[in-house]
Amino acid sequence: MTGIPSDMPNLQLGRLLREASQALRSAMRDCLSNQSLTFGEWLHLRVLADDDGLTAVEIAQRIGIEKASSTSVLDSLERQKFIRRVRNRADRRKSNTYLTPAGSRYLQAMTPYVEAVHNAALRGLSPREIAIFAKIVRMIVSNLEEPVQPPAIRTLVDPPAREQARKSRSRIENIVE
């Protein structure tokens, strides 16, 4: 099947995904803040647990935030002794970030809280529905990794008329100056 089904003209896919994401993030923030961990700190620790030794830029890219936002989180995690940063030998401008044993232990201790949020989010869904949901979301992400070709829509103003209007505005601006 391609496109939005005719019986669902107001699907609002972006809105549905955004609402789900915001609800999940909010529940995660609430749950983790009770454990003295911010959601941002959790994301950073989680990325490092999957791929230890990344640079700040790589961590930020994996999370989907700006490097500047990631830096303050990494500073906090370093003060708490959950990570350590080591100057990169090949490029001294970079540092590689590693989970410390304390960071790994803390991450393990927080995992049940995160799992509780995930379980709450998936409550009422069968294992089959969860698998289908995961497959659909992965397919949406994969579909959007390729450039989207906009539909060929006839513009309200044809290109020659648009160019003529631009030239007229330019002449008027020159007269006014």
Image (cartoon, rainbow, N blue to C red):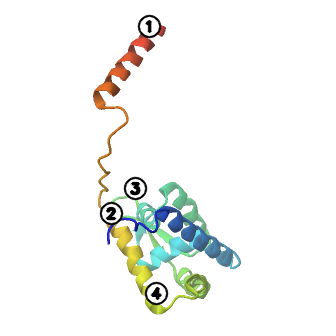
The span from disc 2 to disc 1 (Cα, nearest Å) is: 48 Å
Across and down, in percent, residue 106 comes to 59, 83
Tell me where residue 173 sits by quadrant: top left
Q: Residue at x 42, y 80 (%)?
A: 134
In space, the residues marked 4 and 3 are separated at their CA atoms by 47 Å
- Residue found at the very far bottom of the displayed protein: 127
- Of residue 95 and residue 160, the one placed in the foreground of this image is 160
Q: Say which residue label 3 marks.
A: 93
Please name the amino acid that badge 2 sits on.
Glu
The tag earlier along the polypeptide, 2 or 1, is 2
Q: Is residue 89 left or right of residue 7?
A: left
What is the crowding at mark 4: few (fewer than 14 residues within 10 Å), some, or many (at least 20)? few
Identity, as a three-letter code, of the amino acid under mark 1: Ile
Q: Quadrant of the N terminus?
A: bottom left
Residue behind mark 1: 175
Q: Which numbered marker is on residue 145? A: 2
